[in-house]
Image (spheres, rainbow, N blue to C red):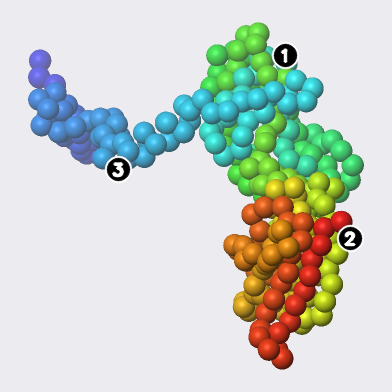
Amino acid sequence: MDRPALKGPLNAMTREGTIITATALMLLALVTAGLIASPGAQAQTTSANEAKGMDISGQWRGSRGLVTKGPDGKVIFLYGEIQPSVVCSPLQVCDIELQAGEVVRDVLVGDTVRWKVEPATSGAVGGQAIHLIVKPAEPGLVTSMVVTTSRRTYHMQLKSHDSHYMARVGFEYPEDVSARLADINARLEVSTIPGAGVPAEQLNFQYSVSGNARWRPTRVYSDGEKTYIQFPRSMSGQDAPVLFVVSGGENRIVNYRMKANMMVVDYHVDRAVLVSGVGWHKEKISIRRGG
């Protein structure tokens, strides 16, 4: 028995469905024949630049970097060297401590369903440190976390293990190391005599200076190997006087070098004479060790 022909809107929908089905079958045949790529395959295709970028990012994420032990069992990462990988465990907490005084702007976690991150603080007001308390819901998870602050941006990887975890995590900051070195150098410079580069207590200042000259030395001292004759700052860039060392009753010209307003003689001097000019313009200064 012949079926009655469908009429009206239902008949139009049937024809449209037939066309869609035919189109889908044709696309499937083309994908199968390899004439066109499937949408999923297109998404997996990468350009040379994309591949290079992923390789660079992968090397940074996979680098071992420097991990050291801090106070109270804290695991210390050098900020910016690598992407730190923080291992946590269910029913335990990972405490990630940021730099004191640093204000957290945003905390972004790739998997917000199975990872919980809660803030905490420590320290006095004005110098508080923010802690990120991280808790995974189950073991075997891997995700990433980005933390933006008032000073920097942290990129971290979070992993969960069934029993092992890092209780405390912190960072060493390169700028802190530089600041500490600058502070140490500043303190050393205060206690160091110019030219000699050694602490003042290691120098011998037992020298007497006699005579009048516009360039009369302000200080003479020795470190036991070299002798340093310091002139007024106005001497910088001007011709230095000639140095004679008194030895065996005779004056001998010796070599020296000038560093700004400092004359450096490469051996220990007992007696010396500084002379500049000739005739009426001659100026002479005598130096003697031991007062």
Residue behind mark 3: 49
Left or right? Give the position of 262 relative to 38. Answer: right
Amino acid identity at mark 1: Leu
The quarter of the picture where the C terminus appears is bottom right
Amino acid identity at mark 3: Asn
Q: Earlier in the sequence, mark 1 or mark 2?
A: 1
- Element type where label 2 sits in the image: loop
Q: Nearer the viewer, mark 1 or mark 2?
A: 2
Q: CA distance from mark 1 to mark 2?
A: 77 Å
Residue at position x 61%, y 25% in the image: 67
Amino acid identity at mark 2: Gly
Q: Quadrant of residue 46?
A: top left
Residue at position x 65%, y 11% in the image: 164
Q: CA distance from mark 3 to mark 2?
A: 76 Å
Checking the image for residue 291, the label placed there is 2
Characterize the local packing of mark 1: few (<14), some (14-19) or many (20 or more) Cα atoms within 10 angstroms. few
Residue behind mark 1: 91
